[in-house]
Image: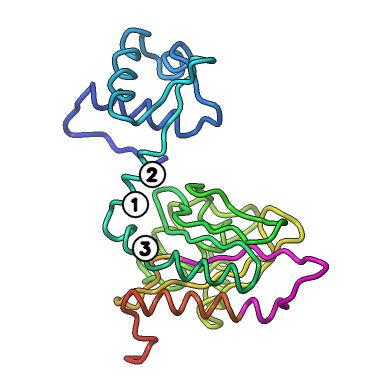
């Protein structure tokens, strides 16, 4: 959830609508009208009017059996209309599909968002056994290979700000994280055990645009199958190559200017 500041101006009706959207974004199965009102400290009447407008505009939908309201995919569609994200995903998707077919592993594309890493692209492996991250998932910045790889290829001001703002992993210091970021930058990728699932190894590489800084990361949560046709090392090379191809399509010159 984005960090809030004390506003100079207020728009109560707009704030109520945004409060509902933000509340529902954290719910797996939605909430009914009374639950929403209780959670937000509002009257049922206030919430009813807001829900009717949000439903009419396509932001929320009501389950006719449970009467619960949940967000639709409309907000996600709007997010993809943002030129930078739209262009990024349009360029990346065919290359990601080619990659997942080649290595039989799932792949996702993530960017830095407010308060975490946001998954904006996801392609499942073509086989029966898959390991994937949900499209639209938000992950803690420092506990995601995607976030660490992006930050490793950003300016010092961004690194310093995120070290100050985002919660550090338990037992980790800023100095340790800086050392790891330097290693990622030196190698051009991050290969490490998953932060959350045993047996999964993250392969993450930066997606760099014309500015020379990372705007996203391509990550494969690699799982080892008994009859894999492509080995881990070949898989790693393919992921790094795919990220470089996406970068070149976004105007990156491959570091030719130094």
Front position among marks 2 and 3: 3
Q: Position of residue 162 (x, y in %)?
A: 43, 58
Label 3: which residue?
90
Label 2: which residue?
76
Label 1: which residue?
80
For numbered disc 2, what is the local secondary structure? helix
Bin the neighbour count of mark 3 within 10 Å (Cα to Cα): few under 14, some 14-19, many 20 and up. Answer: few
What range of the chain is rendered magenta? 217-236
In the image, is 231 to the left or to the right of 18?
Answer: right
For numbered disc 1, what is the local secondary structure? loop
Q: Is residue 248 above or below residue 55?
A: below
For numbered disc 3, what is the local secondary structure? helix
Q: Is residue 192 above or below residue 135?
A: below
- Say which label, 3 or 1, has the lower sequence index: 1
Q: Quadrant of the C terminus?
A: bottom left
Q: Are marks 1 and 2 in contact (CB under 8 Å)?
A: yes
Separation (CA) of disc 2 from disc 3:
15 Å
Front position among marks 3 and 1: 3
């Amino acid at each position: 959830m984005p960090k809030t500041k004390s506003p100079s101006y207020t728009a109560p009706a707009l704030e109520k609508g945004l409060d509902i959207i933000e509340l529902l974004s954290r719910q797996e199965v939605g909430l009914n009208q009374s639950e929403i009102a209780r959670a937000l400290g509002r009257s049922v009447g206030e919430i009813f009017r807001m829900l009717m407008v949000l439903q009419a505009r396509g932001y929320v939908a009501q389950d006719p059996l449970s009467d619960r309201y949940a967000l639709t995919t409309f907000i996600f569609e709007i997010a993809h209309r943002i030129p930078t994200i739209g262009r990024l995903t349009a360029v990346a998707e065919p290359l990601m599909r080619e990659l997942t077919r080649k290595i039989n592993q799932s792949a996702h594309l993530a960017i830095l968002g407010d308060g975490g890493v946001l998954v904006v692209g996801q392609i499942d492996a073509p086989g029966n056994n898959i390991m994937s991250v949900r499209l639209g998932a938000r992950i803690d910045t420092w506990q995601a290979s995607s976030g660490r790889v992006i930050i490793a290829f950003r300016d010092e001001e961004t690194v310093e700000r995120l070290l100050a703002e985002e919660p550090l992993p338990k037992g980790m210091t800023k100095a340790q994280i800086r050392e790891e970021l330097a290693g990622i930058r030196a190698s051009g990728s991050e290969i490490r055990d998953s932060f959350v699932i045993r047996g999964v190894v993250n392969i993450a590489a930066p997606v760099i645009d014309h500015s020379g800084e990372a705007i996203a990361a391509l990550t494969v949560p690699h799982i080892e199958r008994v009859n894999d046709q492509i080995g881990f090392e070949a898989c790693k090379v393919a992921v790094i190559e795919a990220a470089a191809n996406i970068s070149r399509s976004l105007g990156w010159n491959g570091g030719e200017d130094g």
